[in-house]
Image (cartoon, grey):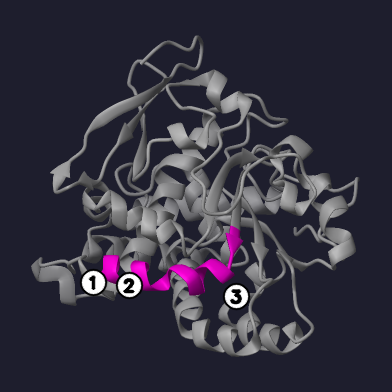
Amino acid sequence: MTTKPNGNGALPSDVDPMAGHIGHLSPDQEARLTELKAACARDGVYEPATTPNEAVVLRYLRARKWSVPDALQQLKNTEAWRETNKLHELYDTIDADAFEDARKVYYMWSGRRDLEGRPVYVYEISHLKNNMASFERSSTNLQSPTTASAAAADPIPGNLRTLCALYEHMTAFVLPMCDALPDRPHPETPISTTTHIVDVSGLGLMEFWNLKAHMQAASTLASAHYPGTLERLYMVGTPLFFPTVWGWIKHWFDPVTTAKIHILAAADVAPTLRLAIRPADLPRKYGGELEWEYGMPPSADAGIVRAVVGLKAEPDAWVGGPLRWVPQLEGGAKVVARGTVQGKQRDEVVAVFDSGEVKAA
């Protein structure tokens, strides 16, 4: 079962926007998920320490077009890759400044959510050109794993290790936090995907070509090891030569991902995005009311600020660097600042969420 948007990326009114997710599966999809979980348990892949919940496993299944053997193999490949590259350690020890430099050349979470409760990310590709030098300098300071297993399976090159930290931020903090918030239409369905706005304005054809290798490597890494995290992507600001560029880049993505990419004409940007994102949560540049621009720290929406005590709505009060959403045995969760600042390891609780009654940190 698949859902196909209209040409501008808006779902027809009679289509379930959560189709293919837990609580909204067809009988065949339910059976395949059950089969995959059993195969994971049999092969020692579906372990709480490495694969937190069935929503994560389901991402792989959707990405592999509901093929259980293909999804199982990709899960195994990713677990080996994560162990080789010590992803948990990378995220917890990365320099906070290097993390922020990486944010300036890749997808940024705006601090807002779409109508279904998914986090909204924005990417203005022109910033990749403007900030690549500082990003490359930060990347050279990151060391590759030194364990004996480092040569075993696909070690991450330095200039992608910081980008991996951004994906870890999405899966270790942004998605679980959005999932915990009850102020959404389907609180019974885990939030495991994101909505993206990608702005390609301001770049010439030669600049696209010069950035091609970096963007291709980043896209390949995401498809291989963070599959199924994209719900839909709206591409805006496309120049006249963009059909040529699209001919290059559409091959970087698997067909499942490509079907989620919607290229919007200038006249369609605001009306289409307003169908998916509240005006208050949509940046002014794209037809909304939000005073937030790419490059700024997240501007947390009112629901997040109300429920997660300690997180601030104002971008200048946001705690930078890696954050973890840490569930508590007694219920609720903590937001813990990780990474290093001037060589010193952080382990600071910066916010607290209580599913029944919010309380001060």
Name the side, left or right, on which 183 lies relative to 142: right
Q: Using the image, tell me which numbered label, if any, was put on residue 230.
A: none
From the image, tell me which residue sits under label 2.
Answer: 136
Q: CA distance from mark 3 to mark 1?
A: 30 Å
Check disc 3 and give the amino acid type. Answer: Asp
Q: CA distance from mark 1 to mark 2?
A: 6 Å
Count residues near mark 2 (Cα–Cα under 10 Å), then give few for <14, some for 14-19, many for 20+. Answer: some
Count residues near mark 1 (Cα–Cα under 10 Å), then give few for <14, some for 14-19, many for 20+. Answer: few
Residues tagged 1 and 2 counted as in contact (Cβ below 8 A): yes
- Rendered view: 262 above or below 170: below
Check disc 1 and give the amino acid type. Answer: Thr
User: Is residue 132 on the magenta stretch?
Assistant: yes
Q: Using the image, tell me which numbered label, if any, was put on residue 140.
A: 1
Residue 229 lies in what quarter of the image?
bottom right
User: Which span of residues is magenta-colored?
Assistant: 123-139
Comparing 338 with 343, the one in front is 343
Query: Which of the two discs, 3 and 1, labels the residue nearer the N terminus?
Result: 1
User: Is residue 320 on the magenta stretch?
Assistant: no
Comparing 243 with 76, the one in front is 243
Please state the horizontal and vertical placement of residue 120, each as a whole percent of the image: 62, 47
- The label nearer to you, 3 versus 2, is 2
Residue at the spot 78% in from the left edge and 57% down from the top edge: 3
